[in-house]
Image (tube, rainbow, N blue to C red):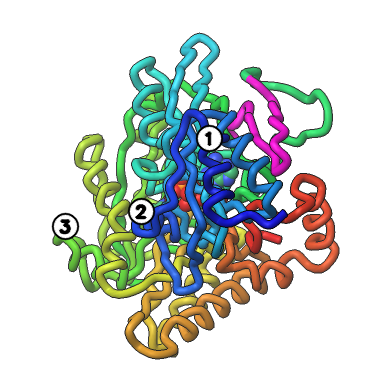
Amino acid sequence: MNRTPEAVLTELSAVVRDGRVISAAPTLERFRSDAVPSAADGRPLAAVLARSTEDVRQSLRWAGRHRIAVTTRGAGTGLSGGAAAVDGGLVMCLEEMTGIRIDPSARVATVGAGALNGDVKDAARKHGLHYPPDPASFRTSSIGGNIATNAGGLCCVKYGVTAAYVLGLEVVLADGTVLRLGGRTVKDVAGLPLLPLFVGSEGALGIVTRADLRLVPEPAPSSTVAAVFPTLEAAGAAVVEIGRCLSPSMLELLDQTTINCLEDLRPAGLDRDAGALLIAQVDASGSGRVDECRLLSEICEKNGADEVNSTDDPDEGEMFIEVRRNIGRAYEMRGALIAGDVVVPIDRLPQLLRAVHELDKTVEVEVPVAAHAGDGNVHPTVIYDPARPGAEDAAWRVCDDIMRIAVDLGGTIAGEHGIGRKKRHMLDRQLGGDVMRISQAVKDLFDPEGLLNPGVLV
Ligand SMILES: Cc1cc2nc3c(=O)[nH]c(=O)nc-3n(C[C@H](O)[C@H](O)[C@H](O)COP(=O)(O)OP(=O)(O)OC[C@H]3O[C@@H](n4cnc5c(N)ncnc54)[C@H](O)[C@@H]3O)c2cc1C
């Protein structure tokens, strides 16, 4: 029996008990895109603002009955189009599932998928504990989104990415089955390791509704080193050597264009003529921090740094980090963005930086570079004028070239932002046919009708 869209929506409203259903077109606008809107983003039929696992379960069963595609959405800060809506689909939004419970003795945070990373950090800090994964978007991105993209960030060079902190997950599958995987134990090898499949699966296998996250004692205060280099490659060489000799808690690299974008946004006294700026932190306890700081500065000088400054004052250090966190806004002032997210084995970092820099000289778009350099994770952002005909396509060609360079250097096209819909066309090139075929088989097992985030990943 064919039912009218109104009847289908009435049925949805009846099954969503705790949350809300939104179907008015103007209100739906904010659910169409993630942080990098594109003309290809769809117009959904409705969005559900879930407030319980049961809301998610019933909505998925409703979507299955009517064969309606579902896009899962956390906070919508993604950079690869994974949370972009599908025409006529449902947006399943977790932003109101924000509960946070800290168990200080077990060192576990049990959180709703919509809780913001920064709120989990704040809640843990009240108990002298710390949740390390820290994407630059930590104040605005959700734990569900962080898990779905296996988010990294600034401190991951020492503390690891999101996957290292996920102990347990509650996941709703496409048919409404609720899986509980792992739990609050730090070790668990019972059964096939299904939990890691969902970390980084970008909403294509199931919807995360709750997570148990591992907390650690708060680290010691950090010392910060800022080193100015004449060239990107010299800074890259310093990064390789630093990684061989010590374990910094942050190692961020900015190129000259990025420095200038930041100065245009808000003058912070950065050297506009510098080839690159390296911002590093060390947080060893006691005198170890002084030794690490000295060694790090020496390595920078040995690799040609023109100027090296360091501070033990956490507030002064935080000023540098705050500048780093503003990069997204600084780039946005110059045009529309495509965020690159390539990673190479750390010894190839100087080669990657050189190749991207050379490319920048030959193309019409701007390609500033910022990097979680200690991880070999480089974000060349392609900035283009969206009003210029053909500019978006040209920008994508540049982004594709950068991904090819990374793969040719033995690296990957995505380190922490996911593949989403926007980088899907390059995935086969990196993974090859066999891996793509097995990935599709896994997708078919969890979501046989292909309703969850269609077009994402597989
Ligand atoms: C200024 C800025 C800086 C950033 N810096 C970093 C950084 O340093 N490191 C980094 O890793 N990322 C960074 N990002 C990217 C982004 O913040 C991360 O990808 C983040 O993890 C996305 O979280 P979200 O809640 O916004 O997810 P969304 O954008 O809503 O969704 C992202 C993906 O996760 C899926 N998803 C969301 N919630 C769930 C769920 N509950 N269950 C299943 N699937 C789900 C979506 O379907 C989509 O595929 C940055 C973004 C911005 C705008």
- Classify residue 122 as left or right of residue 402: left
Which of 400 and 375 lies nearest the eye of the viewer?
400
Q: Quadrant of residue 178?
A: top right
Give me the disc on residue 268: 3
Residue 182, magenta (yes or no): yes
Label 2 or label 3, whichever comes before in sequence order: 2
The reply to whether the C-beta atoms of the residues labelled 1 and 3 are less than 8 Å apart is no
Where is residue 119 shown, x and y percent of the image?
36, 31
Tag 3: amino acid: Ala
**Does 320 appear above or below 216?**
below
Give the main secondary structure, helix, strand or loop, of the magenta stretch. strand
The answer to whether residue 303 shows anywhere in this view is no
The correct choice, above or below, for 380 with respect to 174 in the image is below
Residue drawn at x 56%, y 49% is 7
Quadrant for residue 184, please give it. Answer: top right
Label 3 sits on a secondary structure element that is: loop
In the shown orientation, is residue 130 left or right of residue 400? left
Residue stretch in magenta? 164-183
Q: Amino acid at mark 2?
A: Thr
